[in-house]
Image (spheres, rainbow, N blue to C red):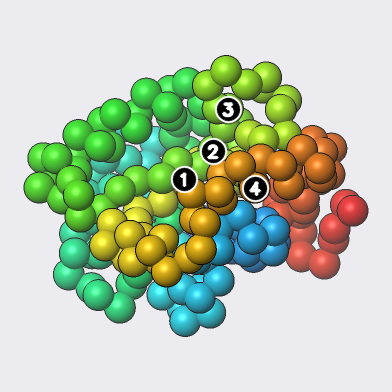
Amino acid sequence: MTRYLCNLGQRQVNVENDRIIVAVKQWVDSMVVGLNLCPFAKRELTADRVRFSHTEARTEERLLVALEAELERLTSDASVETTLLIHPQVLSVFDDYNQFLNYADGLLVQMRLDGVFQIASFHPNYQFDGTDPDAAENYTNRSPYPLLHLIREESLERAVAGFPHADQIPARNIKLMNELGRDKLRALLQACLAPAGKNPL
């Protein structure tokens, strides 16, 4: 009986983990790629070189351990271009998450990977400095769950060099967000969390 309950509990955990990863994949597909917020994302996604990694870390310390493991994996596995490390159980408050980014960058330095990788930030309540919390432009970096995007610096530099007017991407994205409006963007993000086959739009 105990073994049955343990197995049942593990299956429930696995189902929840899968649901979280599916939601993030849906966000990448419908918003990051669908709205072309990152012109470089579709190629790597199509080539299956994007790793979606979920951690059950509940403390910042455990999240740093998970981050270190993902950085080591990227260092040793060239077949993975980039990793999205999803951490729904920790740093749900954006201010705490924003502060944690300093520790994440410090880990890069400690591992001597500063300049090799960079960490991009995405959060359900992302807010750019100086913006209103409800500003549409914040949705360029709003994701279904808190996550850390691990990017290879060399690959990013190569992609930017081959893309005309790459420096205009942020301004273009802000313009698009404002045109779509906060309500539609919120609905698009919420749709990623909806059960399969259900879309609030």
Q: Amino acid at mark 4?
A: Arg
Question: In the image, what residue type sits under mark 2?
Answer: His
Q: Is residue 9 visible?
A: no
Q: Could you give the CA–CA distance between mark 3 and mark 4, rounded to whole angstroms?
A: 18 Å
The structure residue drawn at horizontal position 26% and vertical position 53%, both measured from the top left corner, is 117
Q: CA distance from mark 4 to mark 1?
A: 23 Å
Q: Amino acid at mark 3?
A: Gln
Q: Are marks 1 and 3 in contact (CB under 8 Å)?
A: no
Q: Which mark is residue 127?
A: 3
Q: In the rendered structure, which disc, 1 or 3, sits on the residue that comes first in sequence? A: 3
**Sooner in the amino-acid sequence: mark 3 or mark 4:** 3
Assess disc 2: are there few (<14), some (14-19) or many (≥20) residues with their C-alpha within 10 Å of its C-alpha. many
Identify the element where label 1 is drawn: strand
Label of residue 147 in the image = 1
CB atoms of marks 1 and 2 within 8 Å:
yes
- Relative image position of residue 25 (x, y in whole percent): 59, 63
Tell me if residue 189 comes above or below residue 81 in the rendering: above
Left or right: 197, with 93 as reference point: right
Dot 2: element: loop
Question: Tag 2 or tag 1, which sits nearer the N-term?
Answer: 2
Distance, label 1 to label 3, CA atoms, is 14 Å
Among numbered discs 4 and 1, the one appearing first in the sequence:
1
Which residue appears farthest toward the right when viewing the image?
201
Q: Residue at x 46, y 45 (%)?
A: 147
Residue drawn at point x = 43 percent, y = 56 percent = 84
| Residue 13 percent across, percent down from the top left | 51, 56
Q: Disc 4 marks which residue?
A: 172
Q: Give the camera-side residue of 31 and 55.
A: 31
Q: Could you say where residue 21 lies in the image, as x and y percent from the top left? A: 55, 60
Q: Amino acid at mark 1?
A: Leu
